[in-house]
Amino acid sequence: MDSSLLDAVRLRLAEAGAEPTPAGVAAALRAQGRLLGDSAVLRVVEVLRSEMVGTGPLEPLLADPRVTDVLVTGPDEVWVDRGAGLERTRVRFPDSEAVRRLAQRLATSAGRRLDDARPWVDARLPDGTRLHAVLPPVAVGTTCLSLRVVRHRPFDLDELAAAGTLPPGGDRLLRAMVDARLSFLVSGGTGTGKTTLLSCLLGLVGARERLVLAEDSAELRPDHPHVVRLETRPANQEGAGRVGLRDLVRQALRMRPDRLVVGEVRGAEVTDLLMALNTGHEGGCGTVHANAAGDVPARLEALAATAGLDRGALHSQLAAALDAVVHLVRERDGARRVAEIHVLERDEAGLVRTLPAARWGPRGFVAGPGAPRLDDLCRRGGAL
């Protein structure tokens, strides 16, 4: 497809305020002194429509049900993740400007601004896809675009077991933790499947319970009949109107939640969450970035410091509020696994540390020194 011809048709349609219909494209071609057959006109229509309405060259990739991430690092560098690690595709953009136009149009569809004055954006598209884009010169050379696909139907535990995320029989332990209303965090690195697992576990909550979700970007989609979803909002162009995650957690507490869920604990809202879990809100949960389950107390300590909560106070709150940590890893082959489940205990100095209760094993979870405590917590919750 001649890029100069496409540019001319695109400009003509924009000036006329016309949609890229076959009739409109044919008229624009005639204005350029070009006469094409019906099949060629339809091809131009398809290209322009995908560019102006969909996601352009990325449309076929996002339509693939196996794709979880689409990453663009240049007009001829488009990568996807189908669950086995990143792989380069044959998809190409005409030039760097085409990548920039797509990023700006997607940002506009999400109600966000993306230009030289605000050269990056992190937003959720209308279909739920997570968008992140950075423009030059912050992104060296060309616009960088990242799209994370959100499944409209969440996985269930059987599917996670079949995919190898859970070891054989591992679903019974996770079901028991949810049934016993344990408070827990799902930890792991970026792309390990924290949101996927948490959505699945929330789907196990009893139908008569009310879930209130507070998220920076609404990605959790639990299969549950009673879900209230709250999402943060950035400031407008005047710098006013921002609604942060901490604001949402406070509002969620006034909405009679049976389970309070924070999509990702990443800042001062950790203090509000822990206080909520210490005031009768059992079964609360969320996700947090951490390299290992044992690192979670230190990670929460760092986050609480941003809210002015000192170390001793944080550990006192943490010891009473949180029961367990479910940690996910991503193997070199791209497979995501529940690597370990830890319970929390206090050491001689009164600080919280984690104790392995279950570790991944090819035949099922292998019990660790914290297994008796986890069993006791589940039994006291009436799940075992």
Image (cartoon, rainbow, N blue to C red):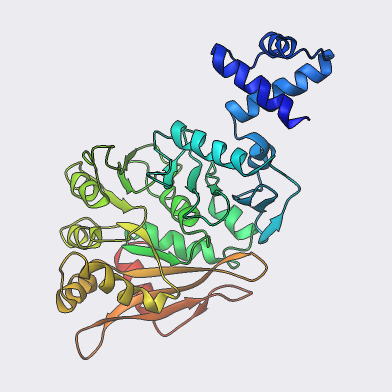
- Residue at figure coordinates x 25%, y 62% from the top left: 270
Q: Nearer the viewer, residue 83 or 223?
A: 83
- Residue at figure coordinates x 38%, y 69% from the top left: 325
Q: Which of the image's four quarters has the C terminus?
A: bottom left
> Which corner quadrant of the image does residue 235 belong to?
top left
In this image, 301 relative to 23: left or right? left
> Which corner quadrant of the image does residue 302 belong to?
bottom left
Residue 94 vertical placement versus 24 (above, below)? below
Q: Position of residue 49 (x, y in %)?
A: 64, 24
Residue 57 vertical placement versus 261 (above, below)? above
Q: Which of the image's four quarters has the N terminus?
A: top right
In this view, which residue lies farthest toward the bottom? 348
- Residue at figure coordinates x 17%, y 61% from the top left: 275
Residue 243 vertical placement versus 41 (above, below)? below
In this image, 178 relative to 64: left or right? left
Q: Is residue 371 visible?
A: no
Numbered label tally: 0
Residue 182 vertical placement versus 370 (above, below)? above
Q: Position of residue 164 (x, y in %)?
A: 63, 63
